[in-house]
Amino acid sequence: MLEPNEKAMFDSLVNRLREDDPVFTRRTNRLARPKRNFYVALAILLWTTAPMCIVFGGWTGLLLAVVGVAYGVHLMSRRGGITSETLWPSPRRRPGVSN
């Protein structure tokens, strides 16, 4: 945990770097963004393995398939998924506040 004066110095350093170095800004912005392609690929993988789990796994496979499909839906609803629109509004989201 930083002390308030150290935090202020760090914030001013980061702000100056953002203003002066576009490569630094691009890299830090990329770190904050979710990996959408990874989420989509993982969701599709989960959805395609779900039928195989049901066929070859019996009731345990059915349970794994339900968990996999639910997690795939969760991944697709994070940050919009394919269509960039959420399936339902997030309860943590406050009007007028950007992420």
Image (tube, grey):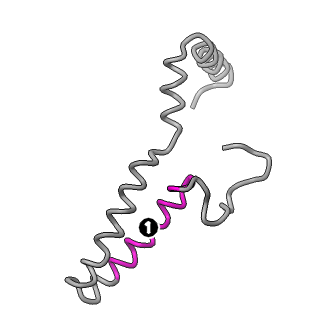
Instruction: Tell me which amino acid carries mark 1.
Output: Tyr
Q: Which residue matches tag 1?
A: 71
Residue drawn 20% across the image and 83% down it: 56
**Residue 2 appears in which quarter of the rendering?**
top right
Residue drawn 48% across the image and 35% down it: 31
Judge whether 12 appears above or below 36 on screen: above
Q: Is residue 6 magenta?
A: no
Residue 43 at x, y = what percent?
39, 62
Badge 1 marks a residue whose secondary structure is helix
Rate crowding at label 1 as few (under 14), some (14 to 19) or many (20 or more) other CA atoms within 10 Å: some
Stretch of the chain drawn in magenta:
63-82
Residue drawn 45% across the image and 72% down it: 70
Direction top: furthest residue = 20
Residue 37 at x, y = what percent?
41, 48
Foreground residue among 77 and 90: 77
* Relative horizontal placement of residue 96, taking residue 58 as reference (left or right): right
Judge whether 95 appears above or below 3 on screen: below
Q: Main secondary structure of the magenta part?
A: helix
Direction left: furthest residue = 56
The quadrant of the image that shows the N terminus is: top right
Residue 67 at x, y = what percent?
39, 74
Foreground residue among 93 and 35: 35
Residue 24 at x, y = what percent?
50, 19
Foreground residue among 82 and 7: 82
**Residue 52 appears in which quarter of the rendering?**
bottom left
Q: Is residue 80 magenta?
A: yes
The quadrant of the image that shows the C terminus is: top right
